[in-house]
Image: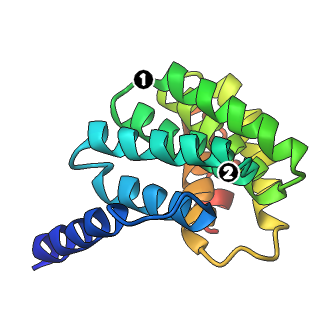
């Protein structure tokens, strides 16, 4: 079953964590472990994300620090702490700009816009979502279409809520 597979994945990740090195690969393992627990045990996920950040800081891995903030913000969203999610994405945005990482700049903008949208603040959400769309769509390294789908869905909902139905349909067709 799907649950058994998820449990097996989580169990194997936890075993790997016991031997993980304090390097960029170790950071990625902690982030992956956090993702595996995000919905079922957000507290455990948050702890794994914090460990990824600690290791990233220790080895001066700026991309790892930014990713840790982005992943940690997901836990904030899941637990309804949207203001905190925005805060951690803004920290990731600053680092991503310093590193000139347009993909993660786009992701953080998407996350900030999504948080404002969840807080029923469409006027604050729109500029973040639109800028995130531009950056993510022009990122040629994008392998995962799910982010583009998430962007289109967020914009479709936002425009629909604002009674801008032509724009809503445009993003619904993407």
Q: Is residue 20 above or below residue 55?
A: below
Q: Residue at (69%, 24%) from the top-left corner?
A: 123
Q: Is residue 152 above or below residue 113?
A: below
Q: Label 2 near label 1: C-beta < 8 Å?
A: no
Q: Nearer the viewer, residue 148 or 108?
A: 108
Residue 165 visible in this rendered orientation of the protein: no
Residue 81 picture location, percent across and down: 42, 23
| Quarter the N terminus occupies | bottom left
* Residue of label 2: 107
Which of the 4 image quadrants contains residue 70?
top right
Q: Residue at (55%, 40%) from the top-left corner?
A: 54
Residue 76 visible in this rendered orientation of the protein: yes
Q: Secondary structure at mark 1?
A: loop
Q: Earlier in the sequence, mark 1 or mark 2?
A: 1
Name the mark on residue 137.
none
* Residue of label 1: 81
Q: Nearer the viewer, residue 94 or 18?
A: 18
Label 1: few (<14), some or many (≥20) within 10 Å? Answer: some
Residue 58 picture location, percent across and down: 65, 43
Q: CA distance from mark 1 to mark 2?
A: 18 Å
| 94 left or right, relative to 144 | right
Residue 126 picture location, percent across and down: 71, 35
């Amino acid at each position: 079953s799907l649950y058994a597979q998820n449990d097996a994945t989580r169990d194997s990740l936890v075993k790997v964590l016991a031997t993980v090195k304090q390097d960029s690969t170790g950071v990625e393992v902690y982030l992956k472990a956090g993702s595996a627990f995000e919905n079922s045990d957000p507290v455990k996920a948050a702890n794994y994300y914090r460990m990824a950040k600690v290791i990233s800081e220790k080895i001066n891995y700026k991309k790892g620090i930014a990713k840790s903030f982005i992943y940690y913000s997901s836990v904030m969203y899941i637990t309804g702490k949207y203001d905190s999610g925005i805060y951690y994405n803004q920290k990731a945005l600053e680092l991503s700009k310093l590193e000139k990482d347009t993909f993660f700049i786009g992701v953080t903008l998407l996350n900030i816009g999504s948080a404002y949208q969840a807080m029923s603040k469409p006027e604050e959400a729109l500029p973040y979502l639109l800028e995130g769309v531009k950056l993510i769509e022009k990122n040629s390294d994008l392998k995962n279409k799910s982010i583009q789908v998430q962007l289109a869905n967020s914009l479709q909902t936002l425009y629909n809520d604002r009674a801008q139905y032509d724009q809503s349909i445009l993003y619904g067709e993407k």
